[in-house]
Image (cartoon, rainbow, N blue to C red):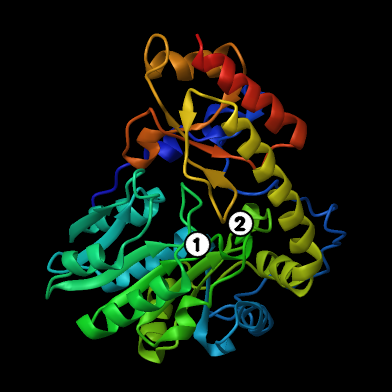
Amino acid sequence: MRYVRMPIEVESPEEYGYGRIRYNLSESSVADRTVHGLGLTVPDLTLLYGEHRGGAELRRLIAETSGGVETDDVLVTVGAAGALFIIATALLGADDHLVVVRPNYATNLETPRAIGCKVTHVELGFETGFRIDPAEIAAAVTPQTRIISVTCPHNPTGTMLTESELRELVGLARDRGCILLVDETYRDLSLNGTLPLAASLGDHVISVASLSKAYGAPGIRIGWIISKDPALQERFLAAKEQINICGSVIDEWVGEQILSRRDELLQPVLTEMRRRLALITEWMAGEPLLDWVAPSGGVVCFPRMRTEPPGGTDAFYKRLLEEHGCYVGPGHWFELPDTYFRLGYGWPTAEELEGGLKAISAALRG
């Protein structure tokens, strides 16, 4: 494994220092929740080795809230990042081939590189609305292709597949004898209706998600792999046992409490995110220096500068942070030019979001 630190992590706000940022629009989740805010009092749990697959009740809740799968189809992991790492290292080797869309969350790209497998990137373009085209995916598949990897809702753009496109990808992977991996981390933040759980559509389809983004609980590190193929699940379990044996008893208990109140916690978030997206849509309509593809899921969007700002992009990001205290995710986090940036609208307060939007407009003008 040839590990290289990812720019998105090197330059993350937690590495830079939250106290140095006034308007943090770089985050890709809703606001972080607290134990007190959730009304929880952690009981006197026994700090034992838990069930290796994850607690049965937590897995039941994940299956129930995902739809179309059973408890035994779920493996609890250390966040979605842990799930993606397990899948890549369990299924990919130097002789295998991966087809993955780009831009993408960095782990979907960097872990396969570290493994040394052959990778074909299917580039999603601004001009085509960052749409995942099943025909382009099909053209990239070879006899050595082991995995087709997509994200929906997409990070960093917030765009989504249609149900027919998702089913077309499911059929493509089945016909070509490979696995379809769908990173569904933002599925519960689909703003205009949720697609079927990808893993429910075939034994050759894997879904990955977590409690980090939609539920504001990245600190408990609860993610999961869903697959209806028992042989795959055994392989993933073997990987998990060699990496960390089992999950945290405390983390899994908190995860149970969150998912048992899923609708109560999620519905107000969805209402607020729709309101915030309307605010950004209005801002974009009045900002002639930017263009975008309007998102339909998640809590991020990916604007593009129409022209280089005064002094270039480096000067823009420096001005934005040092003069205005605003932080966004530059395009190089996603292997694209820095005329693009990821704007997260779910994590800051509404007032901080509005202040950050004003800061971006000011920094664009020098």
Q: Is residue 150 left or right of residue 73?
A: left
Write down the residue under mark 2: 212
Q: In the image, is residue 22 above or below residue 46?
A: above
Badge 1: how crowded within 10 Å, few (<14), some, or many (20+)?
Answer: many
Residue shown at the point (53%, 78%) measured from the top left: 196
Q: CA distance from mark 2 to mark 1?
A: 8 Å
Residue shown at the point (65%, 83%) measured from the top left: 64
Write down the residue under mark 1: 80
Q: Is residue 36 left or right of residue 80?
A: right
Q: Which image quarter holds the N terminus?
A: bottom left
Q: Is residue 329 left or right of residue 95?
A: right
Residue shown at the point (35%, 83%) measured from the top left: 204
Query: Which label sits on residue 277?
Result: none
Label 1 residue SS? helix
Q: Quadrant of residue 352?
A: top right
In the rendered image, residue 87, in percent from the top left (x then y), is placed at 36, 70
Q: Amino acid at mark 1?
A: Ala
Could you tell me if residue 292 is visible in this image?
Answer: yes
Could you tell me if residue 242 is visible in this image?
Answer: no
Do callouts 2 and 1 mark residues in contact (Cβ within 8 Å)?
yes
Q: Amino acid at mark 2?
A: Ser
Q: In the image, is residue 167 above or below residue 101?
A: below
In the rendered image, residue 168, in percent from the top left (x then y), is placed at 34, 77
Q: Quadrant of residue 143?
A: bottom left
Earlier along the polypeptide chain: callout 2 or callout 1?
1
Judging depth in this view, the residue of 147 and 170 nearest the camera is 170
In the rendered image, residue 142, in percent from the top left (x then y), is placed at 13, 71
Label 2 residue SS? loop
Judging depth in this view, the residue of 201 and 114 nearest the camera is 201
In the rendered image, residue 55, in percent from the top left (x then y), is placed at 63, 80
Residue shown at the point (57%, 56%) measured from the top left: 297
